[in-house]
Image (tube, grey):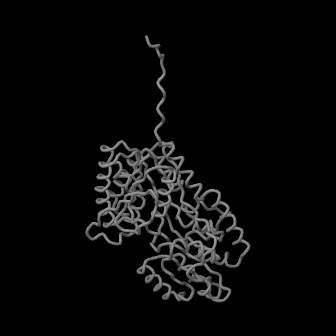
Amino acid sequence: MRILFIAPQPFFAERGTPIAVKLAVEALISFGHEVDLLTYHEGTDVDITGLRHYRISAPPGARAVPIGFSAKKLICDLWLARAAFRLVRANRYDVIHAVEEAVFIALLLRPFTKARIVYDADSIMSDQIAQKWPRARPVNAMARAAEAWAFRRSDMVLAVCPAIARHAEEHTMETKVRVLPDVAFAPEAGGTPAEDLRQYARRDQPLALYVGNLESYQGFDLLLEAQAHIDSSQRCTLIVIGGTDASIAAYRAKASSAGIDRDIVFLGTRPLKQLQQYLAQADILCSPRRDGVNTPMKIYSYMASGKAILATDIESHRQVLDADTALLVTPTAEAMAKGLETLRTHGALRAMLGQAAAVRAKTEFSLEAFEGRIKEAYRLLAPAPAKPQLGLQLPAA
């Protein structure tokens, strides 16, 4: 089949959704499909054999497009819609695979194409809008209605987690919804990280590691406050990978004000290919997220590393983690502090949790499992073969 894959993000960028897009595109091409990928103007070029990658022209003033809803993103989506229209008019597609809000572009193109629409749902968009603008009730109501319409009108919904799948099933047939979780990247043999994380810790001090952006929904404040709740002689060294220069500067100032800057090290961004080598050096992997339903992509790699995970006990985490595979705590600074102290002092518990998580990651969230799920979804989309015409064949006179 020929597929137009619309991803409203910079591509490629080493963060959750662009990584998932890359994996999906590579899988579809490996199955023999033809893929045209349409993305924003920003991002790093990647070499994917057989892929035709189209970028929108740069909209005026739309530089450094941030994560989440913003005026810059809305402008980029207008340019994306125009580019998608041109591609649909120029090519005959069997499927339009639309990520997040690109589903609205795909559905508006329906009068001009016979392509089936796949809604790749990485979040509940109406919830994100409600969290960003809680007082804008008319806007929130419109967002919920539009999202319900998109679920109903799409030919298939690929939900990144069970919670989003359940939400989709409230608006469309259960048979049209498939769960497509992210991938747990397996540790690679060989190679060394850019630096030895132990150099930042005091002698025999355990290492706790946080990986991800420092947006408010990630709950990093809880982790920072948790360090302040623990006596300085009993703290882990907390290593932080990720975040923008501005967010790192803000949190460094908070750590200094709280008197815990000696025990928190901000490294900034690091290459994705080195992620597992960094995870392997840690004793505790932290995910202090406050809310949300979509599971952070990093959780799957945390699991594959075989290291103990400390995570908040929210739906986002409970979809893949339980008491056998992580220490789940209520999303408060006090509970996070107690969790850090528990894992710091119980090496056997860390080993048990890490091993169980690694087994689950290998069996349920491997690249092979991801490819199998998307292959099955597209098999269901494929048109049924034409049935042979039955009837009597009269002999020639």
Q: Going by the picture, which residue comes out furthest to the front? A: 397
Q: Going by the picture, which residue comes out furthest to the top? A: 397
User: Quadrant of the image for the C terminus?
Assistant: top left
How far from the left and from the top, in percent, is residue 27? 51, 55
Which of the pair 336/367 is nearer the observer? Answer: 367
Residue 100 appears left or right of 295: left
* 64 over 233 or under it: above or below: above
Residue 355 appears left or right of 10: right
Which of the pair 252/49 is nearer the observer? Answer: 49
How far from the left and from the top, in percent, is residue 228? 56, 83
Q: Going by the picture, which residue comes out furthest to the left? A: 60
How far from the left and from the top, in percent, is residue 276? 59, 72
Q: Is residue 335 at all visible to an observer of this figure?
A: no
User: For the point 60% across and 58% down, which residue is it?
Assistant: 365
User: For the point 39% across and 57% down, which residue is it?
Assistant: 52
Q: Is residue 216 at all visible to an observer of this figure?
A: yes
Which of the pair 167/210 is nearer the observer? Answer: 210
Residue 373 appears left or right of 72: right
Residue 189: quadrant of the picture: bottom right
Which of the pair 329/152 is nearer the observer? Answer: 152
How far from the left and from the top, in percent, is residue 220? 51, 75
